[in-house]
Image (tube, rainbow, N blue to C red):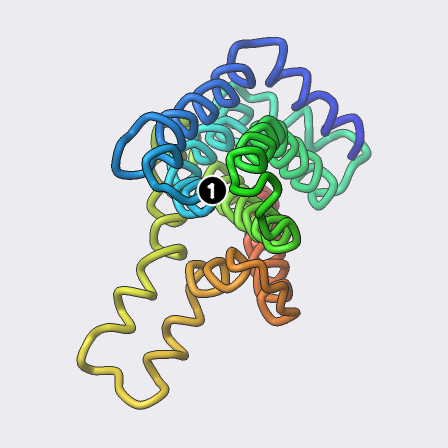
Amino acid sequence: MSAIYFKEINAFFSSLIGYIVIGLFLVLMGLVMWVFPDYSVLDGGYATLDTLFSMAPLIFLFLIPAVTMRTFAEETQSGTIELLVTRPVSDWQIVGGKFLACLTLVAFALLPTALYYITVYYLGAPAGNLDSGGILGSYTGLFFLAAAFVAIGVFASSLTTNQIVAFLLAAFLCFFVFMAFDFLSRLPVFFGKTDDLVQAIGIQYHYNSMSRGVLDSRDVVYFMSLTAVFLAATVLSLGRRRW
């Protein structure tokens, strides 16, 4: 699995893909955090990183599918997937290596946002007037969210040989799992506690809980289970070649 992981990492950074993804994420987040008047920390009058944790998932909805769209679609289209599966590695190792490589790239994109924390830390009155523990919990939630989106994107890429189709399918699935259940829970057909149950199926419910800095084991188990389900579905999708 390590060979596949390093192969994917080298593919990201030996081309412009890795640099474009990281640069685009940082530029978009920088504009939202410091320039756009409706969201800018400088105009808000309160030193907080809430804008980062509320807007980053929306950027991830499109950015992560762009990262994952080539993982299997490109391999299948070029025919190199046959060479890959004949190596002495299992399907789980192939999927795991590609998943971890994509997640590492997203983590690299998140890493420079630590500068936002330092900036907001000194913007507070007095300096350091921040809930650092809550921010750490929010970063944890954002990382789990990214892992779930990456798993969904890798699964979408395994279903098609066209990278554009893989991107669109991954973006749709990420949007649906992230926001659709929140919208569905507001329909008048759900009443009592059923609307809460429907809302709890979606990612947004659990991410909002973690973005408040509260690390509930139920939210952690949800994200880990969702990620595992889509990775298992990817393995099954690769297994179609034997059917």
Please state which of residues 95 and 183 is positioned toward the viewer in this rendering. 183
Please state which of residues 115 and 4 is positioned toward the viewer in this rendering. 115
Q: Please name the residue that numbered disc 1 is placed on.
A: 47
Q: Say what secondary structure mark 1 lies in.
A: loop
The amino acid beneath tag 1 is: Ala
Q: Is the residue marked by circle 1 packed among few (<14), some (14-19), or many (20+) residues within 10 Å? A: many
Can residue 106 be seen from the camera position used here?
A: no
Q: Is residue 61 above or below residue 36?
A: below
Left or right of 115? Residue 159 is left
Q: Position of residue 20 (x, y in %)?
A: 48, 16
Q: How many marks?
A: 1
Which quarter of the figure is the N terminus placed in?
Answer: top right
Left or right of 87? Residue 154 is left
Q: Position of residue 39 (x, y in %)?
A: 32, 38
Q: Residue furthest front?
A: 126
Tell me what residue is drawn at x 58 percent, y 58 percent: 213
Tell me what residue is drawn at x 63 percent, y 38 percent: 99
Q: Is residue 5 above or below residue 38?
A: above
Please state which of residues 215 and 64 is positioned toward the viewer in this rendering. 215
Please state which of residues 143 and 115 is positioned toward the viewer in this rendering. 115
Can residue 80 be seen from the camera position used here?
A: yes
Q: Answer with the quarter of the image where residue 89 lies.
A: top right
Q: Residue furthest left?
A: 188
Q: Position of residue 169 (x, y in %)?
A: 36, 41
